[in-house]
Amino acid sequence: MITMHDSSRTARPTTPHPAPGALGVRVATVLRAPLTRRAWAEAAYCLLAFPLSLAGGVVLLVLLALGAGLTVSLVGAVIGVLVLVGCLRLARGLGGLNRGLASGLLGERVPAPVPPRPGSGVFGRLDARLRDVAGWRAVWYVLVKLPVGALGMYAVLFWVTGLINLTAPLRWGVFGQQEAPADGGGMPVLTPVPVGGFEVHSLAGTFVAVPLGLALLLLAPWTTRLVVETDRRLLRTLLGPNRLAARVRDLEETRALAVDDSVALLRRVERDLHDGAQVRLVAVAMGLDMIKERLGAPDGGSRDEPVDLDRVRQLVDGAHRNATEALTELRDLARGIHPPVLDDGLPDALATLAARSTVPVDLTTDVPRRPTPAIETIAYFCAAELLTNVIKHSGASQVVITVTQSAADDGASAGGVLRLSVTDDGRGGAAVGAGSGLTGLTQRVRTVDGSLRVDSPEGGPTTVVVELPPHA
């Protein structure tokens, strides 16, 4: 059973209503923030990153100034270049330490940038080192991290002053602070700002510092988180792989996948022709040779023995059957390369595919602009493979296939995105690499710079979303 939906119907927008307990959840989140592992990890990161950023930033600034000054001079140009090369290597090393610290405390795993090209000869290696884009980006990170690290240390002061003020009554009793001492001094109540601190001169006065300490502790996780989020952006932008380099590497991988896919397709066609249609055609040729021998001599002479018409009919039937099977295999082979149902467009092809399914399919298509034939073919084969997986492995009773095409302004590419979604109510548990054919589909969609996402918890439902550009 197949159910078609008209894409022109639009759902009436609904006004979202806030959840009744949303305010309580937010208040609970704020109150629990100082007790979470994440808050303490971020505070520890700010505390440990400050000396690293201070020492690294100061040393790098001195070496950069020294190297730049020597380079512009005529006498120490070579030494200045060597100092600059050393700065780049030092910046890369400091970047690696910061990546390791962020990975250990924040769980922020930033891949290391590609190493600089080696170069040939002494001057070639020096030139390659000086042109190390990742090294200069690491220099920028170390320099920018210097004020960010200082802000992180200032954010840690909220934790320190909050804890000190919270323990004011305990410290008064333990250290035996005298009430109203003769010199007029008292116990200081600290604040993170330079002004605003005050002193208390009695045990009762220390309890004024307690709510201030609680307020500072409630505020402390958000101050450190603000600094940490800034540092996260710097890590991803300056210490990770260059976007252009990562894009080039991704295109190289997809090109290799496209070449491997085409080679695999040619081998499959060759194997199917060799093991299928070729064998049938050889059998047809042999059957025709035997028919010629039964009917008469090749030179037109007479035969001494009569023609066995029953045997000739059997040979003709066998040759006809082999020819028909060879024609069917060739037709199936051609359909596997480019299904004829795609000649009328992807929606009609998917409707035909859904009509043949043994599981009821609810199909919705909205493709106002027809993609290129290569994209249509990949989308069709993805839908066919996913539907086959549902029938074989999921035990589902219903499948929903949705194909939409986003506009150019809200898509990831200049021409929008063709999005294929297949959802079933089966047992779930599907994953890429689990033997369900999803790995092959992932490689196929990557050849055209597409993506495949799987959401399949145990117990279902399973949703697979394939996103393809409109042009290959």
Image (cartoon, rainbow, N blue to C red):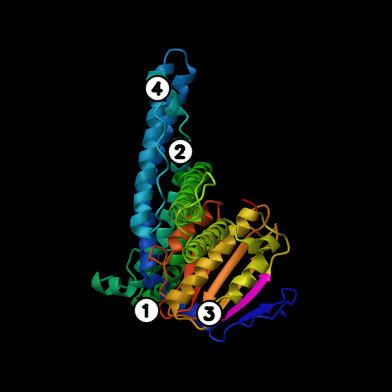
Image position of 279 (left or right of 167): right
Cβ–Cβ under 8 Å for marks 3 and 2:
no
**Crowding at label 2, few (<14), some or many (≥20) Cα neighbours within 10 Å?**
many
The residues tagged by marks 1 and 2 sit, at their Cα atoms, a distance apart of 58 Å
Lower position in the chain sequence, tag 3 or tag 2: 2
- Check disc 3 and give the amino acid type: Thr
Name the disc covering residue 134, or none: 2
- The secondary structure type at the circle numbered 2 is helix
Disc 1 secondary structure class: helix
Disc ID at residue 120: 4
Q: What whole-number distance in Å separates the C-alpha atoms at marks 3 and 2?
A: 55 Å
Of labels 1 and 3, earlier in sequence is 1
Location of residue 168 in the rendering, given as x and y in whole percent from the top left corner? 34, 71
Pointer 3 residue: 358
At which x and y percent is residue 370?
Answer: 70, 59
Q: Nearer the viewer, residue 184 or 325?
A: 325
Q: Of the residues under marks 1 and 2, which one precedes in the sequence?
A: 2
Range covered by the magenta-colored residues: 359-365
Tell whether position 199 is magenta.
no
Kindly report which numbered mark, 4 or 3, lies closer to the viewer in this rendering.
Answer: 3
> Given this view, does label 4 or label 2 mark the residue nearer the observer?
4
Earlier along the polypeptide chain: callout 4 or callout 2? 4
In the rendered structure, the answer to whether residue 102 lies left or right of residue 237 reads left
Type of the residue with mark 4: Ser
Compare residues 383 and 51 and report the one nearer the observer.
383
Task: Look at the numbered disc 3 and give the secondary structure of its residue.
Answer: loop
| 3D distance between C-alphas at marks 1 and 4 | 76 Å
- Residue 348, position as x, y percentages in the image: 67, 68
Circle 1 sits on which residue?
Answer: 204
